[in-house]
Image (cartoon, rainbow, N blue to C red):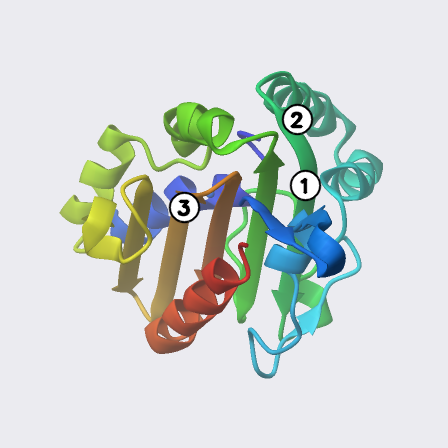
Amino acid sequence: MKQMNRVTVLASVLLLAACGGSSGGSGGAQQETSAETVASSSSDFSGLQKCPESGTWENYLKAEQAKDPTQYDTDKKDLDNLKAAGANDTYVAVYAAATSDCGNFGSDTPTGKVAQIYTIRFKDSSAASANFKVNQKDFHLSDSDLQNIKTAGGTVKQGTTTGLGDNSVLVELSIAGASFYAAFWQNKNFEVAMVTFNVSASDSESATTKINGRIK
């Protein structure tokens, strides 16, 4: 999804400086954790309300199609590629303190508090792990992007130093009165990307921990 809301990740940084397994149920039955269960909880971000574009990635794209049909075509192809790589469930949760920051599908940097969570469930952990590097660049967290964030004065953590496992990257940047946080990781058969703007680092880190803990 190269140009969805998460496209603001690299663009915002450069502008300011110059995107699980199954659990056993009762009776021995198994029920997979849904992407929505992992991504969406009203307790994750105090004071923020869920935006109407939240829902399955298809629902998110439908909202985008109405506002930016050209970008929708690109993002739809990216979702199709994820499905071809083994993705079988998706969810996008968008939260904002002001309704004016909802439905922002362009490259504008949010002026208020905004949190975006993109969750992809794959058919198994092998598929999720294999696709991690591919998706990392789509969230503008490739090696060159990370170097740009460091140059801008941001903090970059990768691998076990993030506390999110080997396949993970976490960045934080505060500059010109605005703050930016992004975490992208693979846990079991899930990949999750969380991006926040103007949300405190402690609140962003707490939400990341909660989201990761819901992967079963």
Q: Residue at x 28, y 35 (%)?
A: 145
Other-residue count near label 3 (Cα within 10 Å), few / some / many at <14 / 14–19 / ≥20: many
Left or right, 157 with respect to 67, comes to left
Q: On the image, numbered disc 2 is attached to which residue?
A: 79
Q: Which residue lies furthest to the bottom in this view?
A: 47
Counting residues from the start of the chain, the first of labels 2 and 3 encountered is: 2
Label 2 close to label 1 by CB (< 8 Å): yes
Taking the spot 68% from the left edge, 20% from the top edge, the residue there is 80
Instruction: Please provide percent x and percent y for residue 22.
Output: 61, 46
| Residue 82 on image: x %, y % | 60, 24
Helix, strand or loop at mark 1: strand
Q: Are marks 3 and 1 in contact (CB under 8 Å)?
A: no
The answer to whether residue 60 shows anywhere in this view is yes
Location of residue 96 in the rendering, given as x and y in whole percent from the top left corner = 63, 69
Q: Mark 3 is on which residue type? A: Phe
Q: Is residue 55 left or right of residue 35?
A: right
Residue that numbered label 1 is attached to: 90
Question: Which element type, helix, strand or loop, lies under badge 3?
Answer: strand
Q: Which of marks 2 and 1 is nearer the N terminus?
A: 2
| Circle 2 crowding by C-alpha within 10 Å: few under 14, some 14–19, many from 20 | some
In depth, the one of 10 and 36 nearer the eye is: 36
User: Relative to residue 166, is residue 43 depicted above or below?
Assistant: below
Q: Is residue 113 above or below residue 76?
A: below
Label 1 amino acid?
A: Thr
Indicate the quadrant where residue 167 lies: top left
